[in-house]
Amino acid sequence: MAGGAIKVEGGGRSHLYTGHTTFAVVMIAIVAASGGLLFGYDNGITGGVISMRNFAELFFPEELAAHDSSNGYCKFNDQILQLFTSSLFLAGAFAALVGMVTCKKYGRRFTMIMGGLCFIIGTVLVASAFHIAQLVIGRLVLGVGVGFATQATPLYLSEMAPYNLRGALNILFQLAVTIGIFAAQLINYGTQHIYPWGWRLSLALAGVPGLMLFLGALVLPDTPNSLIERGKLEQGEKVLKRIRGVDDVTVELEDIVDAVNVSRTIVNPWATILRRRYRPQLVISILIPTFQQWVGINVSALLRASTYPYVVVTAKVVMSVSSLPRRRTSGEYCQ
């Protein structure tokens, strides 16, 4: 697995580590956190964009007619609209699996560069789209960028941060996701009144965090863990000295080398995580995202601008359906 070379708290020798929080670490944290910004921004921007009239006139005129008729059920009864919304997540799930391999084989930095590049390309496609096919393809490319970024950036932050700040800096990714969602809502609030290209501006601004990630990853070094894992011991030691701000990094370097050697002895990491000693972590890591989906927070984050006006209308539709003597099809409701 991509993170196989991480050793928790230096194997009990963390108090022997030397160094301090350098400017390089601060810049690394800011650039790497931009991976969370692009994920959060794209999550938050989608719901506002699909509710904009100028966007619907071009791509979903039927849903616009349903909107004008105040029929909230029919507004979202469109598979292409659902494909536009969900394609990013489908591509992201697949890309995250690929990113796990690229992180291990080519490094965290390479994966971040590819993620930023994909996000820039996807942003250009969706912001310049005049056909639904280009729009969906752009979302798929964006999903690949999101998958790579979410796989590489938390790992990159964890491996570059000093041991005593690892948790604080790593949580920057999640904080950046939230900031990205919030920024997207503010931007949508302003661009909704810009006719007819407000939606293009909303989607185009997603390229800002993607460009930050791409350019930042180009100038930043790869992590010492990744370099040593790929047989570049001297280069890994040089990077470690740079980010710790001292010349004596012997203890931490030895722990990283030991962790890499241990990870190489693991034949099947998937079987390893199923062992009894790792079951609590495995169960928690599965249950947390599962319950997160069940509470509906993602729907609220993505589609609040589109769905909230129709909550009451949808409730009335459900009550009407329950009183009917027979079950009607969705086509009958939307006629």
Image: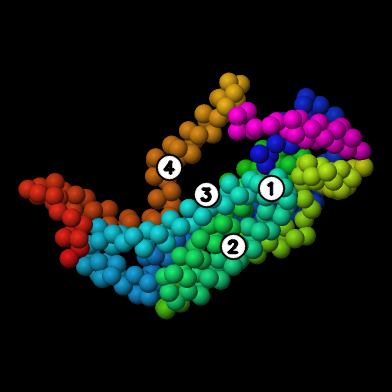
Considering the image in quadrants, where does the C terminus appear? bottom left
Residue 251 forms part of the magenta stretch: yes
- Which residue is labeled 4 in the image? 293
* Tag 2–tag 3 contact (CB < 8 Å): no
Residue at screen point 44% across, 52% down = 301
Q: In the rendering, at what x and y percent does residue 86 appear?
A: 43, 56
Q: Residue furthest top?
A: 276
Q: CA distance from mark 3 to mark 1?
A: 15 Å
* Tag 2–tag 1 contact (CB < 8 Å): no
Quadrant hosting residue 146: bottom right
Decide if residue 57 is on the left or right side of residue 117: left
- Which residue is labeled 1 in the image? 103
Considering the image in quadrants, where does the N terminus appear? top right
Q: Residue furthest front?
A: 267
Circle 1: element type:
helix
* Tag 1–tag 4 contact (CB < 8 Å): no
Q: Main secondary structure of the magenta part?
A: helix
- Which residue is labeled 3 in the image? 93
Q: CA distance from mark 2 to mark 3?
A: 15 Å
Q: CA distance from mark 2 to mark 1?
A: 18 Å
Dot 2 amino acid type: Phe
